[in-house]
Image (tube, grey):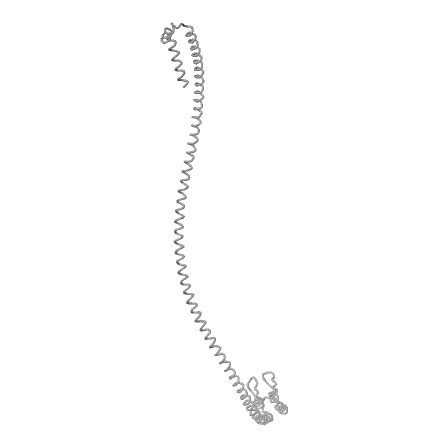
């Protein structure tokens, strides 16, 4: 059907019915115009013709309406048959599609069951892995706590050892300080001892020099006394040789009681003792 819509929702058939153009109305109907079309006010071409009192238009519309009804009835029957055929074809296609969809669904269900089984197996494995992981985490937590406890104890021991070492260091530093002081005192004592030694060596050297000097002086005196004694002995020997045999006894007695010979003999013995 052809429909020409004008302003206000009016079609060409509405205008021709309003203006009473019978031939135009028949031509529009034959051309396929829709006689049941309404405008914005809900009125058909028949309603407009009745309002205007156009009987010719009403007659044409009624006649054509009967023809149109028959034609529409035939068209409806054909359309019903086409619709039944289409529905049959659609049913077959739908059944085929349903069959295919059923197969696909069954295959999908089978795949989904397999996936479900795989998923359940994976979930079971994941649960086992989770339990193992939790157990490992629990063990690791215990080990970590034990290690932390051991580390704290080691830390405390280390701190105690550091404290002891600091104390030992202080004691060693104090001992080193005392040893340095003792060293300084010892060095001072050694210095004083060296000075005393040098002084004693100097005194000993001076005493040795004085003793050697006295010894040389004594040796010179002794040498002089020995020479004098030797000369006296030579003189005595000459006097003895000159004396007579008769006078030897008197001369000997005289020499025993002579003070000069006593002093000579004493000097000789003293010189020999000094020499020794």
Would residue 20 be found to the left or right of residue 92 on screen?
right
Residue most extreme to the front? 245
Front residue of 74 and 116: 116
Q: Residue 163: where, in percent of width, then height?
A: 39, 47
Q: Which quarter of the image is occupied by the N terminus?
A: bottom right
Vertical comparison of 155 with 221: above or below? below
Front residue of 167 and 102: 167
Front residue of 84 and 220: 220
Front residue of 128 and 94: 128
Q: Residue 182: where, in percent of width, then height?
A: 41, 36
Determine which quarter of the picture holds residue 230: top left
Vertical comparison of 204 with 16: above or below? above
Would residue 264 be found to the left or right of residue 47 on screen?
left
Determine which quarter of the picture holds residue 11: bottom right
Determine which quarter of the picture holds residue 13: bottom right
Q: Residue 86: where, in percent of width, then height?
A: 55, 88
Total marks in image: 0
Q: Residue 30: where, in percent of width, then height?
A: 62, 91
Q: Which quarter of the image is occupied by the C terminus?
A: top left
């Amino acid at each position: 059907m052809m429909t020409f819509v004008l302003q206000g929702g009016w079609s060409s058939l509405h205008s021709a019915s309003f203006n009473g153009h019978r031939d135009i109305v028949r031509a529009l109907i034959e051309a396929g115009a829709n006689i049941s079309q309404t405008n914005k006010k809900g009125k058909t071409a028949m309603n407009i013709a009745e309002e205007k009192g156009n009987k010719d238009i009403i007659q044409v519309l009624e006649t054509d309406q009967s023809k149109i009804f028959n034609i529409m009835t035939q068209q409806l029957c054909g359309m019903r048959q086409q619709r039944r055929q289409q529905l049959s074809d659609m049913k077959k296609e739908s059944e085929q599609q349903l069959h295919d969809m059923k197969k696909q669904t069954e295959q999908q269900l089978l795949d989904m069951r397999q996936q479900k089984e795989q998923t359940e197996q994976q979930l079971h494995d994941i649960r086992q892995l989770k339990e193992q992981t939790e157990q490992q985490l629990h063990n690791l937590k215990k080990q970590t706590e034990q290690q932390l406890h051991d580390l704290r104890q080691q830390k405390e021991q280390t701190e105690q050892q550091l404290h002891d070492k600091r104390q030992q260091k202080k004691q060693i530093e104090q001992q080193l300080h005392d040893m340095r002081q003792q060293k300084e005192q010892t060095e001072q004592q050694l210095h004083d001892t060296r000075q005393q030694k040098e002084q004693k060596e100097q005194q000993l050297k001076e005493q040795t020099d004085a003793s050697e000097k006295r010894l040389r002086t004594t040796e010179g005196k002794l040498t002089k006394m020995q020479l004098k004694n030797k000369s006296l002995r030579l003189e005595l020997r000459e006097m003895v040789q000159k004396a007579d045999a008769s006078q030897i006894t008197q001369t000997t007695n005289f020499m025993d009681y002579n003070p000069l010979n006593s002093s000579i003999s004493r000097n000789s013995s003293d010189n020999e003792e000094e020499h020794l």
